Structure formats: C-alpha cells, structure tokens
Image (cartoon, grey):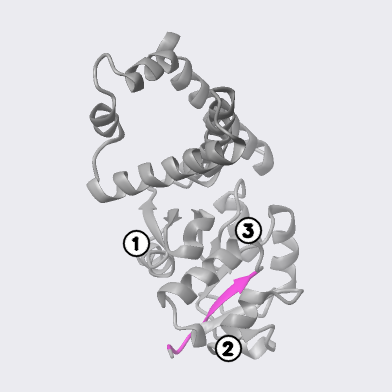
Amino acid sequence: MTDRPVILVGCGRLGSSLVEGWLKTGGLDLRDLIIITPSSKPVAEAAREKGALINPDDEALARADRVILGVKPAMWRQVAADMDGKLAPDALIISMMAGVRASALSDGFKPRPVARVMPTTSMAVGEGVASIWAETDADLDKVRGLFAPVARVVGLADDGLMDAATAVSGSGQAYFFAFVDALTKAGVEQGLSPEQAAALASGTLVSAAAAMKQDGARAEDLIARVASPGGTTRAALDVFAQGGSLERLVSDAAAAAVARAAELSGN
C-alpha cells in the first residue's frame, strides 16, 4: 500500500466505470482506495473485497492525497461543505464533472490544488479515453497515474479547452450510438430484420474502432482504404458530403455541447 490513499466521492456511472476499470486492469491497488457513497453499490462492494474502504471515518479521509469527484455538477458544493476541514491542505481535487470550471473548484476547496478530467465510461473495460488538465506538471502526472491504466489520456494545456474535449469525447460516445441507431433503421428500410440490422450496425462500429486502434492511421486514410472509387461505399459517402452536410452537422452538434457546458458553468 502507499502512504496516502485516493478518495472517490460518488459511485455513479463514471465513478463505477473507473472502479471497474481498476478492478479489471489492476491499475490501482484497491487497498489504497476510499469510496464515499450514500448507497450500496455492487462495484464498491467488489472493491471492498480487494481492500478498499467504504465511508470510513474522518481520520482516513485526512490521509488522502487525491480526491476524485464523481458526483453530479449540482452536488459538488455540498460535497465541498461536507468535507471542509476533513481533507489535507495539499490534497489534489480531481473533478470528473462537465461544466464546472477550475476557478469555481478552487474557491470551493481552497487552498487545495484542483485538476479536471473528462473520461468515458469505457474505462470499465480499460478502453476509455480521458481528457485531463491540471495547473502543474506534477499534478497532471498524479491524474495521469490514475486514469492511464483504464483510458487513453489526452493532456490539455488550458482548462478552457475542457468543454471542447467534452463535446468530442465525453458526449461523443452518444454521437456514435446515434449513428448506429440511424444505420440500424436504414438497414431495416432496405429489407433487413431489426435484429440483423442492429447486429451488423453495432458490429461494424466495433470493427471500425478495432481497425483504427490497430493501425493507428488517420480516419481519412482508413476511409480511403474502404471507399474504392466508383464503389458502393463511395456512393454512400458522396451523399454525406453533399454540401458538406455531415461535417456541418457534427460541427453544430459539438458547438451546442460546448454552449451548454458554458451555460452549466454560469459563463
């Protein structure tokens, strides 16, 4: 065990995904984990079996050097109030919340340093992606050490870029799910059964992701490999490209996500 544990506050979707990922990959010694949760969670109990502490006394909290906030944005100020005086002055506050600026977190948890991360729930299987930001390289390394075992980590130079990163990755999974749903419906329109279309559409997404991960090539290069000139794939892509419609639609969607994050932050 390390001398100082890690606290995870909240074991909802993101928090549970993170713990599941650590359980799967061994990325964190669970004996170094403290979970604060108001209700019993299966993943928390699984972590307890590996040595994690669940809702321990204040003395245990005071030893932690990193505190991960996995609560809803509307709840973090209450968490800050509840933990006032219970955390070490140098404990790094790591937020997984969208739309809550570092400046607000600094005010709420001062004098402690803060960092932000926007991960995806695929951390649960060790295949997530996480955008991270911290004021210092040392703090960035502390965040990276927690998330690199379960996600591809992208460091950001500016907290202000977190909304854009959220629009691309944090929210982006839903864009792909929406496309799979649309592709499934298109397959049904062309004569496939709903079950066949769903299996083919979702399987194709997984296959495409595996190809990108294996090759490490740019998306446009991978498209060129599949879309032969004059072929069926090119005919479909030409429809997407009419008037730049796909690019414009995705750009507008990302801009809407960024705008909503700004509204949530009050900026």
Instruction: Say if 179 sits above or below 86 in the image.
Output: above
Which image quadrant is residue 33 in? bottom right
196 and 215: which is toward the camera: 196
Secondary structure, mark 3, is helix
First in sequence: mark 3 or mark 1? 3
Image location of residue 5, percent across then percent down? 51, 83
First in sequence: mark 2 or mark 1? 2
Mark 3 or 2: in front is 2
Instruction: Say if 253 sits above or below 200 in the image.
Output: above
Image location of residue 146, percent across then percent down? 43, 69
Cα–Cα gap, marks 3 and 2: 36 Å
Instruction: Say if 171 sits above or below 55 in the image.
Output: above
Cα–Cα gap, marks 3 and 1: 21 Å
The residue under the point 64% across, 82% down is 45
Q: Are the two marked residues, 3 and 1, in contact with CB atoms closer than 8 angstroms?
A: no
Residue count near mark 2 (Cα–Cα under 10 Å), binned few <14, some 14–19, many ≥20: few
Q: What label does residue 137 carry, if any?
A: 1
Which image quadrant is residue 247 in? top left
Q: In this picture, which residue range is highlighted in magenta?
A: 2-9
Res 243 visible: yes
Q: Quadrant of the N terminus?
A: bottom left
Total marks shown come to 3
Image location of residue 190, percent across then percent down? 54, 23
Residue count near mark 1 (Cα–Cα under 10 Å), binned few <14, some 14–19, many ≥20: few
Question: What residue would you read off at disc 3?
Answer: 107
Give amino acid for label 3: Asp
Cα–Cα gap, marks 2 and 1: 34 Å
Q: Quadrant of the C terminus?
A: top right
Question: What residue would you read off at disc 2?
Answer: 49
Secondary structure, mark 2, is helix
